Each structure stands twice: as C-alpha cells, then as structure tokens.
Image (cartoon, grey):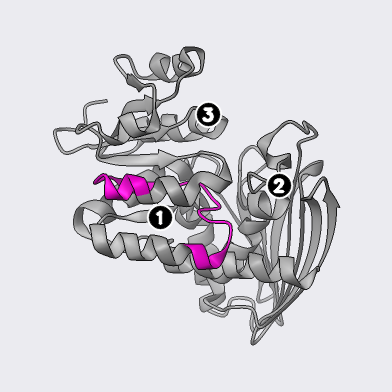
Amino acid sequence: MDRGGQNMRWGILGAAKIARTELAPAIQLARGAELVAIATRDAARAAPFQALVPGLRVHDSYQGLLDDPQVDAVYIPLPNHLHVEWSIKAAQAGKHVLCEKPIALQAAQIDALIETRAKTGKLIAEAFMVAHHPQWALARTLLADGAIGKLEHIEGCFTYTNRDLGNIRHSAEMGGGGLRDVGVYPCITARMVTGAEPERLQADIRWQNGVDIFARVWADFPDFTMSFYCGMMQARRQEMVFHGQDGWINLSAPFNGPVYGDTSVEWRSDGATSIERFNNVNQYALMIEAFGDSARDGTPFACPLEMSQGNQAMIDAIFESAR
C-alpha cells in the first residue's frame, strides 16, 4: 500500500511468533507505517516476513538493525529479561521504541527507560494494544457517564494453554510466568478505565520450576474492589466484568478478540441491556498508528512509561503478597 513519503519505517528485533502473526501484518496495514527490516540470524525464521514484505532487509544482529539509518522505529519482542537493555540501546541509536510487554521485570527498572526517553527525545512505550481498542474507550465512557451507577467490583480472567516446558514463558531466568504474560492485562485495563491505583493486594500463586503458572489476585482500590485469575496451563478463557450499583458491563473478549470469541461490550443500565460488537478491529494496527502520531507530532500516547510503571508496580506487589 502506498502511504506517501512520510511513512514511519519499522524494524523488528527478532522473529518472535507475535511479530510474525500480529505486529508485522499490523505495521503493513497501519496508516503511515511500513516494515523495512528485521534482525535474525535464522534465514528460515526471516522467510515469512520476507513473504509479507518483498525486499525486506534482514540483519544478522540486533545492533546491525539499530545501526540501519533507514529505520525510524523498532518493535522489540525479545525474551522478557532483554527488554530494558535493548529498549535503551535502540533509543540511544536514535530509534523510537515499541517494546513488547512486560517492558521491564520490576517497576524500578522503568526509571532508566524514563531517563533514556528524556535524554534521547525518543518515544519509548510498551505494546499494550488493548489501550487502543475502541471497546475499552466505550467501557471507559460508560463508567465515566455513570451508566452502571457507582462501580463496586471488577472481576476478570485470562488463561491459555502452554505446556511446552521448553518455551521461554516457562523460564524463570528469562522472566517468564503467567502474571507477566497475561496477568498484566486485567491490571492495565482496570487501571486504565478507572484512573485508580490499588491500595492493597493479596494473591495466591501456583509455581512450577520457579515460574508462576496460575494466580488468583484480590485488590482493594480506593472506591471499589477487584478480583481476577490468570494462568498459562489452563483452558483458554478471558473476560472482564464491571459491577455497579445500578448495572454491569461485560467485555467478552477483552484482550485478544476475535481469537477468544465475539468481541463485544454488553451492559445493563436503567433496566435495559445493550450490546455493541467490534469484530472488525485490528487493535495492533491502531496501536502502530497511535505510536506513529505520537512520535511525529507529540500526540499523547495512551500507554506512556508512567502507566507501564504503575502496572509493573502492581505486578511487583502481587508477587510480594504471595511470598
């Protein structure tokens, strides 16, 4: 697709599955963006990206891609423990940075990213695609408008099946585990639509080989409570429900629709039930467009590093409460 001469030119560090299935196609779909390079030593893993983008440049090292003057921004889907290091290196090389979650393993590590952002003037952000999905904008509006009365409780879940013990998500050394992989989503969305931060947290965590494979979490916010569970060795399921004094809001596929089913927001208000469906939305492409707008003209990005740091602080507190 010809998007004119102002496209943001993207490079990808590594050939991770999410880059192949979601981000690379989204970059090509998004307004004002194009994929121009990837870094991987494995030619076979580069092949699907080259099929998507004929003429794609393939670098055999991450640093080689960062040194490419024809790359404006990089997407980083590396193993979790490498995110801070390569985000800093990329920004110092003059690239805008969109890093896969979790952008850091502890909230304190994000201080270095905020400092690097200030020193380089480059946008550094975490790839929470849900922050750009219109279903969450609707949920926020319904809550703000009092459609369900006073919010009393939020409940959620996000589980999936990953029983490959050789997968990096089962590696404690690489920052694996279910909370960092999928538990971050109930946390970020609850904080995002309410603007509130938890005051107390309690969790029960099931561990295997040093990695959390299932967690149940209870949180007290200033004016409401929250509970959710997450895991990576269970049947696939996700849902978020907001319970108010006068109604409720249900998001049936809040994070990965339509993979997890019908992407819809259903709510009960004033004795009537309404529903709005969002099955033709590519939240990854919307994220790429929003990132480009922010990098080019300073449009506020929906998930700045400060939002990410608050989310990681919540995850840190969840781990601490379960010790």
Which residue is disc 3 drawn over? 21
Looking at the image, the residue that sits furthest to the left is 5
Q: Is any atom of residue 127 visible in this view?
A: no
Q: Which disc, if any, is residue 125?
A: 1
In the image, taking residue 191 as reference, residue 245 lies left or right, namely right
Q: Is residue 142 visible?
A: yes
List the residue tagged with mark 2: 172
**Residue 84, image x, y percentages:** 46, 52
Mark 1 touching mark 2, by CB under 8 A? Answer: no
Q: Quadrant of the N terminus?
A: top left
- Camera-side residue of 242 and 123: 123
Q: Is residue 102 above or below residue 166?
A: below
121 lies left or right of 288:
left
Which amino acid type is shown beneath numbered disc 2?
Ala
Measured from the top left, where is residue 60 in percent x and y?
39, 22
Residue under the point 41% across and 63% down:
112
Q: Going 84% across and 52% down the picture, which residue do you hit?
A: 207
- How far apart in space, not on screen, are marks 3 and 1 (Cα)? 20 Å
Q: Residues within 10 Å of mark 1 (few under 14, many from 20)?
A: many
Magenta span has 100?
yes
| Quarter of image, res 312 | bottom right
User: Bounds of the magenta span?
Assistant: 89-109
Q: Which of the pair 31/208 is nearer the observer?
A: 208
How far apart in space, not on screen, are marks 1 and 2 (Cα)?
24 Å
Q: Label 1 is placed on what type of residue?
A: Ala
